[in-house]
Image (tube, rainbow, N blue to C red):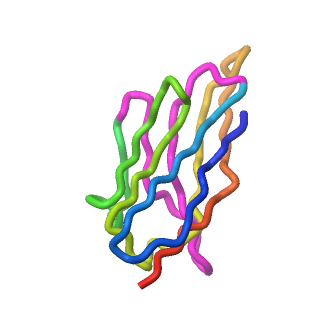
Amino acid sequence: VQLVESKGGLVQAGGSLRLSCAASGSIRSINHMGWYRQAPGKQRELVASIISGGSTNYTDSVKGRFTISRDNAKNTVYLQMNSLKPEDTAVYYCNVVVREYPYGSLGDYWGQGTQVTVSS
């Protein structure tokens, strides 16, 4: 299974950015898709997640500003980030938990990470 993340970028505070992550390969189904981030000197944290049924979960600091969504036909997850703040600056990682062909074994995969920098 391969994950390809879109590029992040540099944005001013208050701006918006959308990340995408496309999964491909021997995927029978996708259980969970999520975005994590890691700022310098900090631990990686969950930003948002979405399960196969569509339920979402957000860390408190991004609620009301970020929206996670998925396109099941494309095996792609998106993170729309609005009202960005300097404290959102981090490397963002896509994470996908899948059931793989042929036996339905569980696989946990990470994207390569993409830098998001928010200037004040």
Q: How far from the left and from the top, in percent, is residue 40?
A: 61, 78
Image vertical order of residue 49 relative to residue 66, above or below: above
Task: Give me the residue at 35% from left, 50% from top.
Answer: 67
Looking at this view, is 56 or 24 the one in front?
24
Q: How far from the left and from the top, in percent, is residue 50?
A: 42, 40
Q: Say how many tags the image has.
A: 0
Q: How far from the left and from the top, in percent, is residue 114?
A: 62, 60
Magenta stretch in the rendered image: 26-54
Image vertical order of residue 116 relative to residue 108, above or below: below
Looking at this view, is 64 or 14 the one in front?
14
Give yes or no for residue 29 being in the magenta stretch: yes
Which residue is farthest top? Answer: 102
The quadrant of the image that shows the N terminus is top right
Image vertical order of residue 78 relative to residue 90, above or below: above
Image vertical order of residue 117 relative to residue 95, above or below: below
Q: How far from the left and from the top, in percent, is residue 17?
A: 44, 60
| Direction from residue 15 to residue 97 in the image, left or right | right
